[in-house]
Image (cartoon, coloured by chain):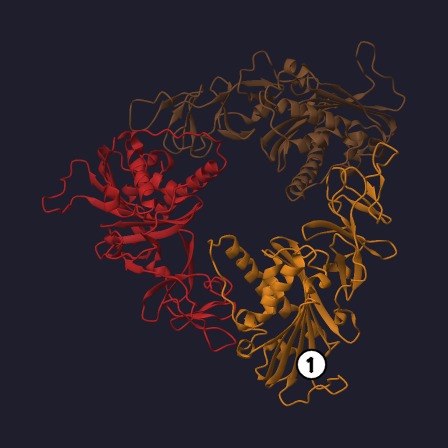
Chain colours: A brown, B red, C orange
Amino acid sequence: MTDFARNQWYVAAYGREVGRELLGRTVLGEPILLYRTEDGRAVAMSDRCVHRRFPLSQAPGRLDGDSVVCGYHGFTYEPDGRCVFVPGQQRVPRTARLQTWHVIEQDSFVWVWMGDREPGTTRPPRAPWLDSADYTVVSGMEPIDGGYGLLVDNLMDLSHETYLHGGSIGTPEVAATPITTEVDEEAGVVHVSRHMEDAECPPFYAKSTGIEGRISRRQDIEYHAPGLYLLHSRIAPVGAPGPAPDGSDPHAFHVEVVYGITPSTERTTYDFWAVARDFALDDQKVTDFLRENNHIVVMQDVVALNVLQQSLDTEKAGYQELSINIDTGGLAARRILARLARPGGDRPAAAAR
Amino acid sequence: MTDFARNQWYVAAYGREVGRELLGRTVLGEPILLYRTEDGRAVAMSDRCVHRRFPLSQAPGRLDGDSVVCGYHGFTYEPDGRCVFVPGQQRVPRTARLQTWHVIEQDSFVWVWMGDREPGTTRPPRAPWLDSADYTVVSGMEPIDGGYGLLVDNLMDLSHETYLHGGSIGTPEVAATPITTEVDEEAGVVHVSRHMEDAECPPFYAKSTGIEGRISRRQDIEYHAPGLYLLHSRIAPVGAPGPAPDGSDPHAFHVEVVYGITPSTERTTYDFWAVARDFALDDQKVTDFLRENNHIVVMQDVVALNVLQQSLDTEKAGYQELSINIDTGGLAARRILARLARPGGDRPAAAAR
Amino acid sequence: MTDFARNQWYVAAYGREVGRELLGRTVLGEPILLYRTEDGRAVAMSDRCVHRRFPLSQAPGRLDGDSVVCGYHGFTYEPDGRCVFVPGQQRVPRTARLQTWHVIEQDSFVWVWMGDREPGTTRPPRAPWLDSADYTVVSGMEPIDGGYGLLVDNLMDLSHETYLHGGSIGTPEVAATPITTEVDEEAGVVHVSRHMEDAECPPFYAKSTGIEGRISRRQDIEYHAPGLYLLHSRIAPVGAPGPAPDGSDPHAFHVEVVYGITPSTERTTYDFWAVARDFALDDQKVTDFLRENNHIVVMQDVVALNVLQQSLDTEKAGYQELSINIDTGGLAARRILARLARPGGDRPAAAAR
């Protein structure tokens, strides 16, 4: 099991999931209530009434303006967590106050700060493609019955595409092509690159881009530990010109694959997945195809990770993993996560000493 | 989790549930077999064969006259728990004897004495309306996936009717009206009263009594710890005369709501519920309405308590409940239950010292 | 819970279950992959990839010739457990090797040696009827949610047929007839015999043999601890001649009931069951009847043993079983199993000292 890294931003929901209905999520073991005030601000508050621990998100709990009314005895809370009504008496105890969490809405995500200290100027890492007019996005969330470390392992080593996702995004070249790995220990970012300059075009990209022959396919991973994973995917016909000196890249198709990786409990995880593309922006068929096919890919991972968690749970003492070159990025990620989970390990300065 | 109070009477079943079919129940963690002898006497016996612990209530176990035949190897027991037949040999070992429990049938319930000493003259508390020609009764049992303390909490604080049961029995006045609480520590009885002299009539009572305007509504709780809860509910049109000096009360409708609260395991409970009324005795529509609607109310509680148990199970260390005035009765009940659960705490004399 | 006896042969599968599809079984807590090479040899290999513990039997894992390709990252193993391919690099680490187990195919079963030492000349006990032209066989496997000791108990004491299987194979005489028990401690074999010379013919035998009157019915159990149970069942009309001096027995019907008893985890068991008969060999109606009816009998046991495991799991401290004469064989079996489970206890010489 991978320890939780506290004092970090995590994706708790998509902005579209948070509204005037009460939503309960569990992040790092904390039950969190999410809703939106009448003026549109997202609120993250403890999802347990101070009175008898009833989940506020549980029916018949409800919103009354910007306040939340507990469905059991009517204890009522303002967005700042302060209790303003209790039944049967005028005086509300001073200690009747629920924990709230800092919230930032950014790039279509509702991020919450899961820390025992203030975030200060720390902000969540960016995934601007998810909220940009230049991209069309499909996205969703799947819960995993496995610890979040299993999902990090999975995403850091894309050689599994060739096997687990053989029919859709994997081709022989993915597993066969060596990777380069760069680690920014202080920033907590791991880069893993795999550039296939003459590769088979998998159905996922053939059908969405219309390319018929072989492709130049680049996978550039950028993992911002603990909670955001970016895969910059560039596809172009073999021989097409590369990016221009000004950074423009008109001869290639770009897909930004984004994962919000959010530990729910020690052995469950929220897998927020999104696929943004810079082509065929208004083509609904391409949108539908990518949504359906990426969901299939995500579910193949979910099934595999659920199975891995069961393997872990029933494992004999003394089992030793065996790591190879492809695991360089994943091992770097584990090292950073272990450091972030240590007391004070979230402070880069402390880590650098 | 609320500790078990032993040396107490508990409702194990309705009398109508105990017959010539074998019934298995688990009370205070003890597997109990219930059946009725040919002359109609209810028997409570250990539900585990002395041989290989097979549950006697499990098919194809069966009755042979007044004896129980184990469905695995045929070990046969008399109602006093004595084994009188074993397969393959004439001699029955002297130690082949099952524990039995004292049984009292009263007020439609089968009570069992769950003690390590004799009950002596102790008898279960009364709920005479459930077996009276002057009342019509609807009743049932629902298992709860939660400890019995959660059900006691729930019933001692009826302000939750306003919120959890808003559409049926709750109105704003229930939560808003202050309560008075009286505790008889020695007898282990808690009284909580809430008298609403000018209140909205909830659908539950409007449809069953036919009252159309506002009502005087009195809720008088009488909790006999640990296992019997009575709610004397009096409904009358506002302004109607009160009870006469001789105790008669012809201008009001009376509903006696009764709960048998029986711990099954540490985190499961039998919720025996009954509603007795002194009006519209032969009106099948009223009977059907009250049965259906009270079942809805009970299930709202069951769902809520199941959720609370899950909250408890996943709770962070250090969670503190916050209690207010409405909890006075519930806290008194908890105090009495804690005393009853202590060794010797079931003896009032010991408690009084 | 009955401890595991290691350094023993166990039935992992029927031969017909092991082919060119990957089959995962858990034996004595060990996840085992079973498949057949192209030349027909059965292989038993650890079902966890050395890399990240993914079960090799899990889709999309697959065979490539005689090698197994992991469905997660493509690690590829030869039948001897040696890893011969890993993704992204030429060199395969020397330590990349999976445990394999010795396999013997015999009497329709695939036996695996679950030991920490070599089997040497030890071979599985025999059940030749399951693979003989002189017998017709019906067989199957049912998983039990209970420890294997419960199944051994069950099968060693057939007096339960009278009660648990009253409608099919049990008659009053089974429970009423005394048994004789012989124990070969050193060989680890227990014999239990019950000879009923004038007994009711149960439907199971009446319908399959066509006998209409009373029968001589002999049950001769031969339990080879820990994993093979044989019930030699002989049925003949009352008064028919017995076996001839040369061992032939033309006046009787013979049914060989065979169980492979394989502990899966501490509280789950594989129940391999087979019924071989030496009569009506080509009568499909008899085959269908015996398959259907023996499956009913097996499922009655499965349900009972699942219930017993639940009884065990929730049992109060201090429960004591009570054993009688019918348990002599079962107690002998437990004693041998306890000895076999002790370190060195599997060596008969050590046991004899």
**A11 and B98: which one is in front?**
B98
User: As displayed, is residue C316 above or below residue A121?
Assistant: below
Mark 1 element type: strand
How many other residues sit within 10 Å of disc 1, few (<14), some (14-19) or many (≥20)? many
- Residue B313: where, in percent of width, then height? 48, 38
The residue most toward the top is A246
A191, above or below C254, in the image: above
Residue at the image point whose x is 25% and y is 45% from the top: B350
Q: In which quadrant will I find the N terminus of chain C?
A: bottom right
Left or right relative to B204: residue A13: right
Mark yes or no: residue A228 visible.
no
Find the residue positioned furthest to the right: A239
In the displayed structure image, the side of residue B110 where residue B250 appears, left or right: left
Q: Nearer the viewer, residue B322 or A237?
A: B322
Instruction: Report the quarter where the C terminus of chain C lies.
Output: bottom right
Residue C140 quadrant: bottom right
| Chain ID, mark 1 | C
Where does the image place residue B129, in percent across and percent down from the top left? 24, 53
Q: Observer-nearest residue: A3 or A160?
A: A3
The reply to whether residue B10 is visible in this rendering is: yes
Image coordinates of residue C212 in percent, x first then y, are 61, 85
Residue at position x 40%, y 69% in the image: B82
Seen as rendered, the residue at the extreme left is B245
> Is residue B15 or residue C331 the one in the foreground?
C331
**Residue carrying label 1:** C253
Task: Tell me where residue C56 sits by quadrant.
Answer: top right
Q: Is residue C272 above or below residue A310?
A: below
**Is B132 left, or right, of B139 in this rendering?**
left
> Hey, what amino acid is under mark 1?
Phe
